[in-house]
Each structure stands twice: as structure tokens, then as C-alpha cells.
Amino acid sequence: MKALNRKQAAAHARGSRAALRPGSVRSALLRCAALPPQQQQQQQQRQRQQHGEAAPAQDAAAAPRSRVLRAAAALALAAATAAAASPARPARAESIVSVLRDGGRDIVKTASGVSYTETATGTGAPVASGDLVMLDLALYLEDGSKVLDTRDTGVPVGIIPGGPAPTAVTEGLDEVVRSMRAGSTRLAVVPAALGYGPKAVTPRNATGQVPANSALFYELELLRCQGTPVGLACCSEAKFGERGGVCIPEETLEQLEKMMGPGS
């Protein structure tokens, strides 16, 4: 394109300004596109004043609405900041420790280093050597992570105190269970030496691994159990109470006996 001399450039600029009359839509669009939002609003107000126009009703309502939005944004930011600054809810393992340390309960500390407290005393039979007992238990690590919860899996853990134990049961837990009654619940802390020791272990049905040399934090309930023609039916103390002192309803037990036939 051929370069314009000064006079030609000035004439070209005057023509452009004439084409963009103050009231034209195109001029307004171009000016708005070139200005930041705050300056766009100021420019529009000046134009209304020059033409003797009143500010639209929506502009009058927009100001308080804008203030409300800014206030809401500030509140949301403050809430997010407070949430980020507030400490996380104590992990379950920490709460078990605090109960054992500061809960005002009767804390049992064994010579081996196991600590436990009974949170509810059952009225069922005490554990006897050689008995098969069933436990609902939750196992946590020191960082608060949950490794196993039989209430989630629906598969309680069977243990013969003093006998061979499944991988979900440790020497320390065996020690805690021996003095329980059916229906009792306890919190317990087992030191690493009476847990899984120097081995990393993934207990059966666990959702994670227990690292080597980990202290173990347990919530446990010794379940009520009832013999049936096909084995043991076990339930929590709450279910035992709801079902009138049995773990399996009488009509269900009768059906099982009929299915198994005479001599069952």
C-alpha cells in the first residue's frame, strides 16, 4: 500500500471519525472493544449526559446487585481460606489413642505392652481356651488410614484364642480377646512387636497393606454366636437384642432344621 503524506493521513482520520458518529452502533462497539469494562461504563455515562438521557433502570439495580455478588465472593473466599487453615478432623487412630490416654476409662496395660479399654461390656459367655469366637473388627494404622473393616466386608474374623490365627489376627489382639465376653466392644493398641513385626502384611479382605514395624489400632466386638444345623450364626450385640436373644430368627432356624432333615 502506498504511504500517505501528512495531509492525506489527517483527511483520512477526519473521514473515519465522521463515519463513526457518536451515536452509531458501530462506533459504540468499537469503543467498547477498545476499553476496559470500568472505562466502558464511564464512557457510556458521559454519552448519556451529553445527550440528556437518564440512566436505564437496570443500571440502578445493577449496582446493588454487583455489591451483593462481590460480598458473596468475599464470603466464599473467606470460608475457603478458613477451611484450608482449620485442622483436619482427627484420624480414627488418633481418637483411639486419645480415648486410651485421656478418656477417663479403665485402661488396661499388659506386661507385653498392649493397651485396651472396654467401651461396652457384653453379657454373653466369656471366652474359654479352645473356643472358636467371631469378631467384628476395624484395623487402623498410626496415620489414621483404615486397613480392614469386617463391617464393610460382611465377613467377621474367626479366632481360637491361643491357637493358630488368620492373618487378620495378631498375637497382641489374641491377648485382648482372651478376657472378653460375647457382646463386649473394646479399643486396643498393639505394639509392632506383637503385631506383624518386621514384615509388611496384607490381611485377608484388607483394603491396604500394613507396613513393617507398624503399631496397630483396633476397634473390635466379640459377636454373639448361635449354633445351627449348618454351623454358626453370629451377630452384633445390637442385632442380638433386636432378635430377642438369638442371632438367627426362630422361623429361619426351623426352616434350616427341616432342610437338613432328621438327625441334623
Image: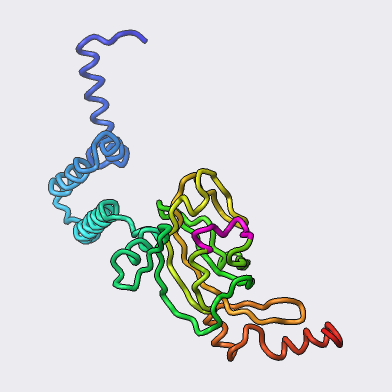
The x, y position of residue 50, in whole percent, is: 13, 45
The x, y position of residue 227, in whole percent, is: 69, 81
Q: Against 28, is 74 above or below?
A: below
Question: Which of these two is toward me, 260 or 9?
Answer: 260
| Magenta-drawn segment | 164-174
Res 136 quadrant in image: bottom right
Please identify the dominant SS of the magenta region. loop
Magenta segment: does it hold 205?
A: no
In the image, what residue occupies the spot 59% across and 78% down? 235
Q: Is residue 69 visible?
A: no
Question: Which of these two is toward me, 149 or 118?
Answer: 118
Q: Against 151, is 58 above or below?
A: above
In the image, what residue occupies the spot 62% across and 79% down? 225
Horizontally, residue 4 falls left or right of residue 227, namely: left
Res 251 quadrant in image: bottom right
**Outermost residue, right direction?**
262
Q: Is residue 256 visible?
A: yes
